[in-house]
Amino acid sequence: MRYSSILKQNNILSIISFTIFSISCMVLKSRPCSSTAPSSLETLQVDGRFSFVQNEFAAKDFGNQFHFLPSAVLYPKSVSDIATTIRHVWQVGPGSELTIAARGVGHSIKGQAQAPQGIVINMKSMNGQGMRVHTGKFPYVDVSAGELWIDILQECLKFGLAPKSWTDYLHLTVGGTLSNAGISGQAFRHGPQISNVDQLEVVTGKGEVVICSEEQNADLFHGVLGGLGQFGIITRAKISLEPAPKMVKWIRVLYSDFDTFARDQELVISAENTFDYVEGLVLVNKTGLIHNWRSSFNPQDPVKASRFISDQRTLFCLELTKNFNPENADEIDQEIEALLSELNYITSTLFMSEVPYIEFLDRVHSAEIKLRSKGLWDLPHPWLNLLVPKSKIHKFAEVVFGNILKDTNNGPVLVYPMNKYRWNNKTSVVLPEEDIFYMVAFLPHAIPSSMQNDGLHYILSLNKRILDFCKTAQLGVKQYLPYYTTQEAWREHFGPQWEVFVRRKSAYDPLAILAPGQRIFHKAISTL
């Protein structure tokens, strides 16, 4: 009886999957086919415009490894433009190869926001439609999905407010981060950005404009949050806000032992009275580390700090912040001293800085400016982001940080824990099956032509070694910003969530028109 039940469920799932890939027969009977769909876009009535030439920018992204040219780029001036365009492709049906991808600033790593011979929607062209900050007991900001988080922060600060959860880099669009999760060092306390959304406006793969929230069209709301663009294009969002501090105490300390480092991180994220931001860095053979810190941080003990040698060592940096307002500075200093007294870092490596809140949150932009000046920002970025269960992080660290990783001079390696209960388990994000898990992010840049350890080939092979180890050792690791090339691999990634994911795809984008760059589903093309 149990076997037949399982078989029945698998048959149903197969039928749903078949529908997504092969719905063409039904659609062809009621909708005309067209092999000249791009030319039909020229007469489509939109408030914005289509571009059919000089669209090379839409075939590039931050990863700079995949380059697929679209047939057209839509510069929408309204949500109606997006709905009209998707509805047009939906009505043409599988007689057209056209697919559609939403693009913010193109910060994807492996072509996820590209649409080969399809339509790329430039979401930034909808900026300027009004950013409305609502104050009161439950403050929020209502924004276009093409707005940058840095612009949202600047506007909200005028009201003494700010979003609760961030990404490390703020020059990203709302729609882009909400389609993944949006995480940084505040996630242990507030959850990811997708846990701080009150309402969304979404255009589905049928061209339907839908308002959704926890109370209204909840299945679509949960699906698009972390849904990798598969069920609809987010066009507006209401983001929850909190009172914003004016200043930040920014702290860095070092560890030579991973177990102690991890234990202290877990202590920090589990305490009720704790820091406001927690991240960690792996530092392998970093020359002149302490000297570099002195440019923006002050050592508690300058003499001892000057004697500390980082060369030829694997170290772990714990980065912490405490928010405050100037009138509470003395009180915050005492609180920080008490919190630090519970940690077991190398005492000579305590560094501290005091900066405006916005300067801390926008810290990566300063690094971006330096990298651009050196021509390093536009290099390939073969990033690998992993979510590692707490029970497996020590084994992971022993092999990866102790053996596979030889240095961290090509880019930072982040490692920090998060609390799973801060994540909404109804969304599409896939997490490890433990209450605490670690983000481990390898964020290098690569020299395409180099055959050394800074070369693209070498770094990609390093990533493969890490992934192969995780799979062989059965660590239960999940990819964040996932990338797979087969549907079987995607099925394995989603695990028990795959059935829900396929059902939502069938409901909201049955022709698999949206986000083809994710390579999860492929549009069924009819040759009749």
Image: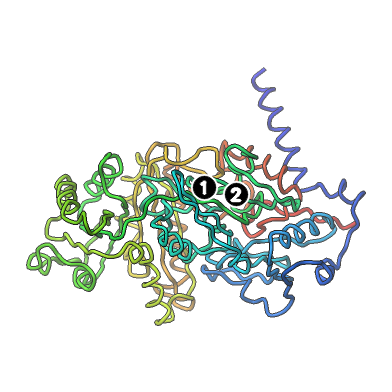
- Amino acid under disc 2: Leu
The residue drawn where x is 73% and y is 72% is 49
- Amino acid under disc 1: Val
Percent across and percent down for residue 468 are 46, 51
Q: Is residue 271 left or right of residue 362?
A: left
Q: In which quarter of the image is residue 223?
A: top right
Cα distance, mark 2 to mark 1? 8 Å
Percent across and percent down for residue 139 are 46, 48
Percent across and percent down for residue 250 are 25, 60
Q: Which residue lies furthest to the left in this view?
A: 303
Q: Name the residue beneath numbered marker 2.
A: 200
Q: In which quarter of the image is the N terminus?
A: top right
Q: Give the answer, above or below, for where 313 lies relative to 435.
A: below
Q: Give the answer, above or below, for where 526 lies relative to 301.
A: above
The residue drawn where x is 65% and y is 69% is 68
Q: Name the residue beneath numbered marker 1.
A: 197
